[in-house]
Image: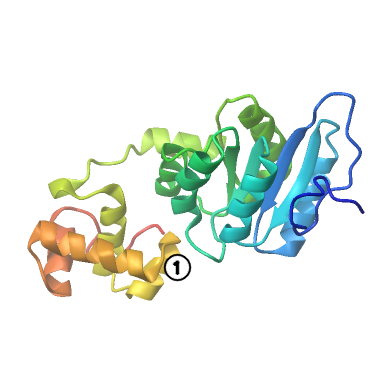
Amino acid sequence: MGMTHQDTPTPEGASGKARTSTNPIGLILADDRAVVRSGLRMLLDSESDFEVVAEASNIEDARRYVRGHRPRVLVLDLNMPGGSSLEAIPIIREESPDTQIVVLTMQQEPAFARQALGTGALGYVLKEAADDELVEAVRRAAAGESYLNPRLGARMASEPPPGPPDDLSEREVDVLRLIALGHTNTEIAEQLYLSVRTVETHRSHIQQKLRLSTRAELVGYALERGLISTSGEHGS
């Protein structure tokens, strides 16, 4: 199977699909599981105007292949090794402004969709609906149009995000909730797809802004502001 671009380092699964008479929509798939990439590739390759030019299993390779291939669309999983996919979205958009990003994820929380779309992604598709929605989302993104899973979009419309209190950013509010629920920095990093160092930085900023130093004080603040319930329930 030949490479699409001979002057680009061999990526995982470079496509040997023959080009159509018109320029196809070049795609890169980024997911850490090979079986998922295989299924996505079969789905997308079934479209005559799509061409999967590379596959990546981590954030670093995804960025490198996007810089090398300049695809029209990057299909990006949120849970990838090598860094935060959410934090990578604006970086990838800056490195390759003509590449649109469609997030494909299991995360159904509106907060993740808001951040992904707010930082530069054009599409947000849930993996459970990929067979029905991914092709449309990719096609729309290639045309510069947005796509959001309808069920998640309805949730976002009915549950508008509250304004961050006391000058906390939305991400700092997310970290504060998880701190108040007893999660460690490592657990918070895993849930929010951040590095532990980034979580530590957010935690420091939260304590400085709120002038609070202990977890008990943070829990009391979160309860008072309605950021968590007395039962400790929180959708994550």
Front residue of 226 and 189: 189
**At which x and y percent is residue 145?**
57, 25
Left or right? Give the position of 169 relative to 165.
right
Residue 45 appears in the figure: yes
The residue lying at 78 percent from left, 53 percent from top is 39
The residue lying at 58 percent from left, 40 percent from top is 101
Q: Quadrant of residue 194?
A: bottom left
| Secondary structure at numbered mark 1 | helix
Residue denoted by label 1: 190
The vertical placement of 60 against 170, above or below, is: below
**At which x and y percent is residue 158?**
38, 35
**At which x and y percent is residue 167?**
16, 47
The vertical placement of 11 against 28, above or below, is: below
The residue lying at 48 percent from left, 35 percent from top is 153
Q: Quadrant of residue 43?
A: top right
Tell me the quarter of the image containing the N terminus. Answer: bottom right
Q: Looking at the image, what colour scheme do you see? A: rainbow
Which class describes the residues within 10 Å of circle 1: few (<14), some (14-19), or many (20+)?
A: some
